[in-house]
Amino acid sequence: MKRREYNHNREQDNLRKKNLEVVALDLDGVLFDGPSATLPIAEKVGIGDELKEVMMKSAKGALKLEESIVQGARVWKDVSTSALQNLVHELPLMTGAEETVAKLKEGGYEVGCVSSGVSQWFMAPFSDRLNLDFAYSNVLSEEDGKHNGEVEYVMGGEQKAERILQYLSSNGFDTDGLASVGNGENDIAMFGISAISIAFNPVSEKVTEAADYRIESKDLRDVLPFILPPH
């Protein structure tokens, strides 16, 4: 585990930790052990190559995030949403994910996930497995129990921050009580509204620079010392 140097002293860090009430986590690469929770499912239902093509274009910068979500949705057209949800239950969580969420909830924190990488049919099973307090994702359309290839709501980076702000406001919290954990550039806006932000295995230096801490680890429990106040 590597910790990024941070300008605040330990006393200031501990003071900020005491004010935390809500923890928002990314899905891909944070709660889910892998770069994309959608890809292994796509491969199981026979559309892996098509989804990989969209993902490769996005990785090369040929598609912006929002457009990659729209094109990715078309790949899922006619796939059964119920079958998809059943397959999601088999996906591997990041080591320590369940324990991390449980520990935070035991401490009185509200814990949730905000993801640009999946739809509501992926997010709902993950939320159930982890007993999350909130969960937001892209929203795709369906007809007769199947994807119809259309997108109702795109969860881009700015939208991540907006949805979290809405959650805080609706539940009597403010940004002084927010900690966030992410790994991608679409998490930077979320970091910007957080009292404490953690780049967990960040994909780029840009992500590292936007966060208060950087952690390189395959165990999500390693974020806990940066969120929980000292005993």
Image (tube, helix red, strand yellow):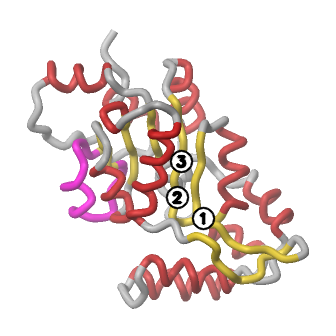
Circle 3 is placed at which residue position?
113
Circle 1 is placed at which residue position?
118
Name the side, left or right, on which 88 lies relative to 62.
right
Which residue: 70% across, 75% down?
Answer: 43
What is the C-alpha distance between the residues marked 3 and 2? 6 Å
Picture coordinates of residue 227 (x, y %)? 35, 29
Label 1–label 2 contact, CB within 8 A: yes
What is the C-alpha distance between the residues marked 1 and 2? 6 Å
Which region shows up in magenta? 200-214
- What is the quadrant of residue 147 in the picture? bottom right
Label 3–label 2 contact, CB within 8 A: yes
Query: Of the residues shown, which amino acid type is indicated by label 1?
Result: Val
Position of the C terminus by quadrant: top left
SS for dot 3: strand
Name the side, left or right, on which 206 lies relative to 189.
left
Picture coordinates of residue 31 (x, y %)? 53, 47
Label 1–label 3 contact, CB within 8 A: no
Q: Residues within 10 Å of mark 3 (few under 14, many from 20)?
A: many
Which residue: 25% across, 26% down?
Answer: 16
Circle 2 is placed at which residue position?
115
Most foreground residue, 33 or 9: 9
SS for dot 2: strand
Query: Of the residues shown, which amino acid type is indicated by label 3?
Result: Cys
SS for dot 1: strand
- Image position of 230 with respect to 10: above or below: above
Which residue: 39% across, 90% down?
Answer: 62
